[in-house]
């Protein structure tokens, strides 16, 4: 069975106490802290909100090609002046756009990694439930 480096610890008694506590919690209806359905829904909402943030950031990181309608008026009435100002802004913020695009790409990778980790956690949770069921079957007196 299990071995311990500390001889003062009785592993069998500890396992017996642990199984008793788990059985007690199951009888009280505490099978999981949070049902798997709720976890899946929470994780889905989490990933969807991250994707919405990254899509918004990606849209804002693009080069502006149209002059905002709020800034129309006497000085900005000429299309040549507007075009020159847009080109100047594009040049000035070129480095910042590259940084923003790199951050958006990194964030997309992070979302992909989060999605993969959530899938792995779901698999581990299922394996734990299967292991718990098989342990309960083998621990029952015959």
Image (tube, rainbow, N blue to C red):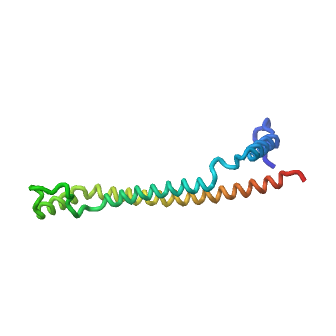
Report whether 69 appears left or right of 142.
left
Report whether 18 appears left or right of 79.
right
Residue reaching furthest to the top: 8
Q: Quadrant of residue 127?
A: bottom right
Q: Provide residue 119's location: percent of width, then percent of height.
A: 58, 60
Report whether 38 appears left or right of 95.
right
Q: Is residue 21 above or below residue 62?
A: above
Q: Quadrant of residue 16?
A: top right
Q: Provide residue 15's location: percent of width, then percent of height.
A: 79, 44
Q: Provide residue 142's location: percent of width, then percent of height.
A: 90, 53
Q: Which residue is painted at 82% across and 40% down in the image?
A: 13
Between 4 and 123, the residue placed more toward the observer is 123
Q: Provide residue 141's location: percent of width, then percent of height.
A: 88, 51
Q: Which residue is painted at 21% across and 58% down in the image?
A: 68
How many numbered marks have been drawn onto this rendered protein structure?
A: 0
Q: Which residue is painted at 15% across and 63% down in the image?
A: 83
Between 50 and 106, the residue placed more toward the observer is 50
Report whether 127 appears left or right of 114.
right
């Amino acid at each position: 069975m299990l071995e311990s480096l500390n001889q003062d610890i009785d592993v069998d008694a500890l396992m017996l106490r642990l199984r008793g506590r788990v059985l007690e919690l199951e009888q009280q209806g505490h099978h999981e802290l949070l049902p798997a359905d709720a976890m899946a829904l929470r994780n889905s909402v989490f990933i969807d909100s991250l994707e919405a943030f990254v899509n918004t950031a990606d849209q804002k990181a693009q080069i502006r090609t149209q002059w905002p309608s709020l800034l129309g008026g006497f000085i900005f009435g000429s299309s040549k002046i507007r075009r020159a100002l847009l080109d100047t802004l594009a040049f000035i913020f070129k480095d910042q756009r590259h940084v923003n695009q790199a951050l958006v790409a990194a964030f997309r990778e992070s979302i992909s990694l989060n999605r993969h980790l959530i899938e792995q956690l779901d698999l581990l949770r299922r394996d734990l439930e299967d292991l718990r069921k098989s342990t309960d079957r083998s621990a029952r007196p015959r």
